Image (cartoon, coloured by chain):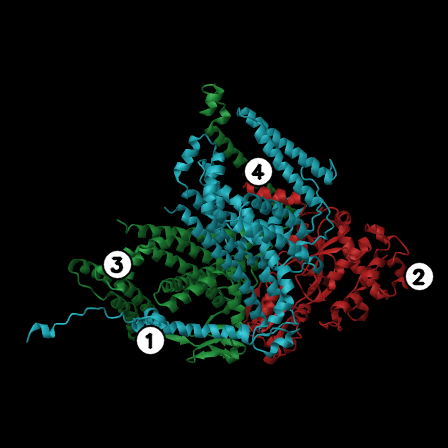
């Protein structure tokens, strides 16, 4: 306004350069052009450098023989396998440690988070100290601690700690009996599945009955009976088709049975304990976000503290908890890449480590690795968004 | 994406860049006044910094020899510690001028990575170290053992080949850094520690009780270790090659850092050629004719370097073995200067 | 029986009795908080047992059985506890890495300058914040750069081809002048075209270039300081350099990305989203691998970066993506009325952002920024995997020194590292809480 008064020009003639639309278009074109130029520069540089240095390129290397061993593999792997196979071994190991880590961290995190709000002074103080200590120390340091410091405290195979003559703990890992499946063993798996489906049906039926008649049904114990009882019954009915392969000390180490390598244990412990501290804070914030009136209203309806927590507080808190919880799960998955520091054969260690070193094809190997993590992240957040949407429907 | 440009421009403007001309490394080195030398992150006997940051070792002496040949001054070297993973990239990108980093000469490295190996400064082989208390006396008794090693090296592949060839099961635990391997082996994670035999002697010093461990007699691979330069610069390649050869020739001719001045007056034509009294061999590689004199005067011949860094009188206590001159039972052999 | 005989009316109050011993004081507090029910009692006993399991052994290891003085491993082997003598012997390396002894005063001076600049900045009641920011973000980085590296860098020019003018300081200044003049001219042309006064933007550009020139001159001058290559840096020095450079570089980048993500221009928004989600989706360690192994391949032949600088670029890009999300949170909290008010006043987009929205948004996200700094500070330990020696890397590499290797050396080293990191991170998180509370009151009615 001031400008119009002072200039007295009336409506100023507008230059096209001042039109926000045209301007925006110019900016965007400029941005795209500069990015394309930069990308072009990078790609040509890379091609020139690779050619000059005579480094092979392309993804053909994935079919070449790997030639190195891997400590832990969920799928068949030997030195004759290809680099591509080694990639899958690494990826599955990453997923294994991430999934188990998420489960353990969630359980531990919820316990600590609720303990933090406990009216018991000792318990809430312990939870507080745990959270503040663990969150403020780098994860890598914790991994080193759990691996190197604890490894030294565990005896060598000849002096293993023994539990019931079948489980052994030493500095080569934890050795347990491995089940051997004989004919008929699949019936047990089927019984287990039937148990799970059965308990779902019971739950729905009990819910419906409670809605109609107000009578409750002990769903939990029925489910336990179905899921555990059915397979056990089948086990005996089929004539005990599962045997056990016990680990035995032979030469340097235990043979047979099931072995959990110390790298896995160290990494899992560190990841779970570290992430649990963050999850605990998320849980605490979530529970505090539910107004106290909800608790009071629930008490006045005659619900005891247990059901109040389970039926009133947690469902409402979950909606606050889930988005940050997703972030923590993603962090844990990404942090599992620190395995490379303690030789747990995860994706980064096997693929971006050994394979990269053996082939020298850094660009391809790192591109694949980064894309895999990106995909894992996107998948997790998609799942969590879906879950979040489902939880949000509870609101009326 | 403009954001990339900022660090690039800042970095370029701040001069934190090293310029590497692939065609004339020598001119480049002369103009900046020192050699940038890629070494290990700490391997006693080969390249190891003390707590003051001074580097010593056989590989370090190679860098000093090159500096002596070019500048007549063995101190004009700067060291870049490199991990096994980044060593080749660092050389290829021009971050270092020469890479004497206990690197094994293999065909694929020589041909597929755009590098050239300038001779061998230590003939090594992969060996095994075990605890004495295990009572093992041969590598063939290692069936079922856990083996600790480094990733990114040839050792990881050799050990796989060896155990497979002998039909022995094993468990491999491969770490990114040598220090972590030592720590894990020391903590009892593995029965066996495998790397180049020289490395075993060197790393053994870092164990809590070095005397509780022994190196097994088997050598399961050939590991000729040598300095590496970029492919495509023949002059620089020649300098690197002939600095090494000159030191071996010097040992053969009995020229040492102590007697090199007297030897200048020697009647032996081979010595005269070596020390630049006769002929113009230095000029042919772009250096002064007293290049080899400077090398031997300030660093010494090959035997002297060996004795000072890894020989029997050092903590490593390695005997000459394969690395003795061809004339005394080893395979150290250099083409003549003529 | 008459009523009077048994009727009794108390005429004065009975003295208030003390509350039962069991409900006041320590005992009462214990009954209330620790033993109020059977379940609570079990929990308390369990908690006490946990403390018993963890605390006494730690104290025993760290204090009672510890060796405080000594000159080598023999001194520490005797007691089965922490070997603090080793930390004492290595303390210099843990702080400075392999920085030359004679030059360590330079690092100390940088630390001191940093503290002098930072402390008044952090205390809200101290005035002269503007001068303080100029010192911290303008003078301090230049001074730190010159002190730590030794300055005296070679300026070689960057624009004109080498065969035209030989690389020298002169070429640098010619190149510099060309770039400055071209940018100023472009700005002038555009503003004239847009019918506004070209004077102001050209002066601003001139000032920016003048400041850059001063920085370049300062970096070029030989102050007589010995050059110290970055591969001799280590310990806490590297940790702080990586963390602070990372956060300072990521802040402007993060702001630009956050604005980009909220931009109305679809291309800008899409690119910002891709950039942010990409860096947030990959682990830092792969970013560091990329910067240490792949980045050299992307550069033109003959150009290479210092190893530390490469790691810094990776860390800055990585944390910029996280910073962008933090800033976006702040931007979203600014009510729409502020934008509309600014537009009604005739402010341009950048004036609106710089004068109205960002000052409010950034103030809101200070705790978030501090939290991402804590995360970054902890993440700096990852650089040890690519072979830089930060505090943890330096400590780890000292474990293999045969003259100090005992079964307790690594425990001691890790404990020391944990304590240092904990003190830094806990301090910062307390500060973040303090700021949160302080900022919160501003919005309360």
Give how far apart the Cα atoms at labels 4 and 2 are.
Answer: 64 Å
Q: Earlier in the sequence, mark 1 or mark 4?
A: 4
Q: Residue furthest top?
A: A9
Residue C22 picture location, percent across and down: 31, 73
Q: Earlier in the sequence, mark 3 or mark 1?
A: 1
Q: Do tags 3 and 2 sit on the same chain? A: no
Q: Which mark is residue B265?
A: 2
Q: Identify whether C33 is placed above or below B80.
A: below
Name the chain under label 3: A
Residue C439 picture location, percent across and down: 44, 48
Name the chain under label 2: B
**Based on the displayed image, in which of its 4 quarters is residue B240 positioned?**
bottom right
Q: Which chain is cyan?
A: C
* Residue positioned 42% across, 36% down in the render: C339
Describe residue C399's horizontal placement relative to residue A195 as left or right: right
The N terminus of chain C: image quadrant: bottom left
* Residue positioned 64% across, 31% down in the render: C181
Q: Nearer the viewer, residue A177 or A127?
A: A127
Residue A350 picture location, percent across and down: 53, 60
**Residue A58 in view here:** no
Q: Residues within 10 Å of mark 4 (few under 14, many from 20)?
A: few
**Based on the displayed image, in which of its 4 quarters is residue B169 positioned?**
bottom right
Q: Which mark is residue A37?
A: 4
Q: Which chain is green?
A: A
Q: Nearer the viewer, mark 3 or mark 1?
A: 3
Rendered shade, chain B: red
Q: Which mark is residue A240?
A: 1
**Residue A297 in view here:** yes
* Residue positioned 70% across, 35% down in the render: C174
Q: Nearer the viewer, mark 4 or mark 3?
A: 3
Give how far apart the Cα atoms at labels 2 and 1 are.
Answer: 93 Å
């Amino acid at each position: 306004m001031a400008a119009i008064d002072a200039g007295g020009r009336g409506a100023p003639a507008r230059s096209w350069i001042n039109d926000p639309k045209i301007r925006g278009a110019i900016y965007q074109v400029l941005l795209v052009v500069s990015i394309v130029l930069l990308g072009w520069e990078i790609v040509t540089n890379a091609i020139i450098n690779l050619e000059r240095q005579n480094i092979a390129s392309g993804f053909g290397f994935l079919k070449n023989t790997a030639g190195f061993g891997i400590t832990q593999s969920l799928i068949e792997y030997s030195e004759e396998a290809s680099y591509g196979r080694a990639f899958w071994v690494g990826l599955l190991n990453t997923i294994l440690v991430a999934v188990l880590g998420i489960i353990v961290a969630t359980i531990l995190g919820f316990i600590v988070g609720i303990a933090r709000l406990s009216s018991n002074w000792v318990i809430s103080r312990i939870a507080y100290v745990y959270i503040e200590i663990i969150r403020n120390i780098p994860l890598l340091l914790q991994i080193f601690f759990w691996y190197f410091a604890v490894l030294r405290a565990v005896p060598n195979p000849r002096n293993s700690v023994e539990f019931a003559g079948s489980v052994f703990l030493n500095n080569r890992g934890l050795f347990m009996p491995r089940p051997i499946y004989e004919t008929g063993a699949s019936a047990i798996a089927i019984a287990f599945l039937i148990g799970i489906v059965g308990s779902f049906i019971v739950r729905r039926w009990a819910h419906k009955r409670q809605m109609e008649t107000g009578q409750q049904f002990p769903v939990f114990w029925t489910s336990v009976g179905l899921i555990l009882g059915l397979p056990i019954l089948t086990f005996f009915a089929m004539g005990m088709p599962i045997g056990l392969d016990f680990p035995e000390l032979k030469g340097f180490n235990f043979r047979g049975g099931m072995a959990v390598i110390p790298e896995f244990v160290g990494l899992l412990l560190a990841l779970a304990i570290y992430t649990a501290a963050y999850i605990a804070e998320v849980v605490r914030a979530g529970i505090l976000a539910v107004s106290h009136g909800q608790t009071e209203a629930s008490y006045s309806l005659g619900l005891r503290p247990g059901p109040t927590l389970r039926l009133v507080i947690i469902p409402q808190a979950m909606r606050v908890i889930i988005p940050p919880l997703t972030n923590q799960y993603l962090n844990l998955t990404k942090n599992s890449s620190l395995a490379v520091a303690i030789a747990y054969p995860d994706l980064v260690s096997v693929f971006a480590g050994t394979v990269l070193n053996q082939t020298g094809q850094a660009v391809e190997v790192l591109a694949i690795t980064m894309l895999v993590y990106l995909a894992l992240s996107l998948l997790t957040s998609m799942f969590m968004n879906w879950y979040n949407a489902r939880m949000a429907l509870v609101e009326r | 994406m403009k954001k990339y440009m900022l660090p690039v421009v800042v970095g370029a403007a701040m001069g934190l860049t090293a310029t590497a001309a692939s065609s004339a490394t020598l001119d480049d080195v002369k103009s900046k006044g020192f050699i940038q030398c890629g070494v290990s992150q700490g391997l006693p006997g080969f390249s190891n910094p003390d707590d003051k940051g001074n580097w010593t070792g056989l590989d370090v002496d190679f860098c000093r020899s090159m500096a002596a040949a070019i500048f007549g001054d063995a101190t004009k070297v700067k060291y870049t510690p490199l991990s096994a993973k980044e060593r080749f990239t660092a050389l290829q990108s021009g971050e270092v001028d020469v890479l004497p980093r206990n690197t094994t000469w293999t065909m694929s490295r020589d041909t597929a990575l755009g590098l050239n190996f300038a001779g061998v400064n230590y003939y090594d082989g992969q060996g095994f170290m075990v605890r004495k208390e295990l009572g093992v006396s041969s590598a063939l008794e290692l069936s079922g053992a856990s083996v600790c090693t480094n990733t990114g090296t040839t050792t990881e592949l050799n050990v796989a080949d060896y155990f497979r060839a002998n039909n022995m099961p094993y468990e491999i635990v491969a770490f990114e850094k040598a220090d972590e391997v030592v720590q894990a082996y020391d903590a009892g994670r593995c029965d066996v520690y495998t790397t180049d035999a020289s490395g075993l002697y060197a790393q053994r010093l870092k164990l809590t009780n070095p005397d509780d461990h022994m190196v097994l007699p088997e050598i399961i691979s050939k590991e000729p270790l040598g300095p590496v330069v970029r492919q495509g610069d023949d002059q620089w390649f020649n300098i690197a090659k002939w600095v090494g050869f000159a030191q071996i020739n010097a040992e053969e001719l009995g020229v040492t850092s102590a007697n090199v001045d007297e030897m200048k007056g020697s009647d032996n034509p081979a010595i005269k050629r070596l020390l630049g009294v006769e002929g113009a061999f230095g000029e042919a590689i772009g250096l002064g004719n007293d290049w080899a004199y400077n090398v031997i005067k300030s660093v010494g011949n090959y035997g002297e370097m060996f004795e000072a860094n890894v020989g029997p009188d050092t903590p490593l206590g390695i005997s000459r073995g394969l690395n003795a001159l061809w004339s005394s039972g080893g395979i150290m052999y250099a083409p003549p200067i003529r | 029986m008459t009523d009077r005989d048994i009727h009794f009316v108390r005429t004065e109050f009975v003295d208030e009795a003390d509350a039962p011993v069991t409900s006041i004081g320590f005992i009462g507090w214990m009954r209330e908080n620790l033993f109020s029910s059977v379940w609570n009692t079990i929990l308390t006993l369990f908690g006490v047992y946990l403390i018993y399991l963890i605390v006494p052994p730690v104290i025993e290891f760290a204090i009672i059985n510890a060796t405080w003085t000594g000159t080598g491993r023999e001194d520490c082997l005797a007691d089965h506890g922490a070997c603090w003598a080793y930390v004492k012997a290595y303390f210099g390396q843990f702080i400075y890495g392999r920085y030359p002894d004679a030059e360590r005063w330079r690092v100390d001076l940088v630390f001191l300058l940093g503290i002098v600049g930072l402390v008044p900045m952090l205390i809200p009641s101290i005035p002269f914040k503007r001068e303080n920011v100029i010192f911290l973000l303008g003078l301090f980085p230049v001074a730190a750069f010159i002190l730590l590296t030794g300055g005296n860098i070679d300026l070689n020019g960057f624009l004109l081809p080498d065969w035209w003018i030989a690389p020298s300081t002169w070429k640098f200044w010619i190149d510099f002048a060309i770039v400055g003049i071209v940018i100023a001219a472009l700005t002038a042309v555009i503003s004239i075209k847009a019918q506004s006064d070209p004077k102001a933007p050209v002066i601003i550009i001139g000032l920016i270039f003048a400041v850059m020139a001063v920085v370049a001159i300062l970096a070029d001058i030989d102050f007589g300081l010995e050059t110290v290559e970055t591969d001799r840096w280590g310990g806490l020095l590297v940790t702080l350099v990586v963390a602070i450079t990372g956060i300072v570089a990521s802040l402007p980048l993060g702001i630009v990305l956050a604005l980009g993500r909220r931009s109305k221009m679809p291309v800008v928004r899409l690119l910002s989203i891709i950039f942010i989600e990409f860096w947030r989706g990959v682990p830092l360690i792969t970013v560091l691998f990329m910067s240490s192994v792949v980045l050299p391949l992307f550069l033109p032949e003959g150009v290479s970066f210092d190893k530390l600088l490469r790691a810094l670029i990776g860390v800055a890009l990585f944390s910029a993506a996280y910073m962008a999300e933090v800033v976006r949170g702040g931007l979203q909290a600014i009510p729409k009325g502020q934008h509309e008010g600014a537009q009604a006043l005739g402010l341009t987009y950048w004036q609106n952002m710089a004068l109205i929205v960002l000052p409010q948004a950034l103030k809101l996200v200070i705790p978030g920024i501090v939290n991402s700094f804590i995360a970054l500070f902890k993440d700096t330990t990852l650089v040890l995997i690519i072979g830089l020696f930060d505090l943890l890397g330096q400590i780890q590499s000292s474990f293999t020194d045969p003259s100090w290797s005992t079964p307790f050396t690594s425990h001691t080293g890790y404990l020391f590292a944990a304590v240092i990191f904990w003190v830094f991170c806990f301090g910062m998180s307390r500060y973040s809480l303090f700021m949160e509370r302080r900022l919160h009151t501003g919005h309360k009615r």
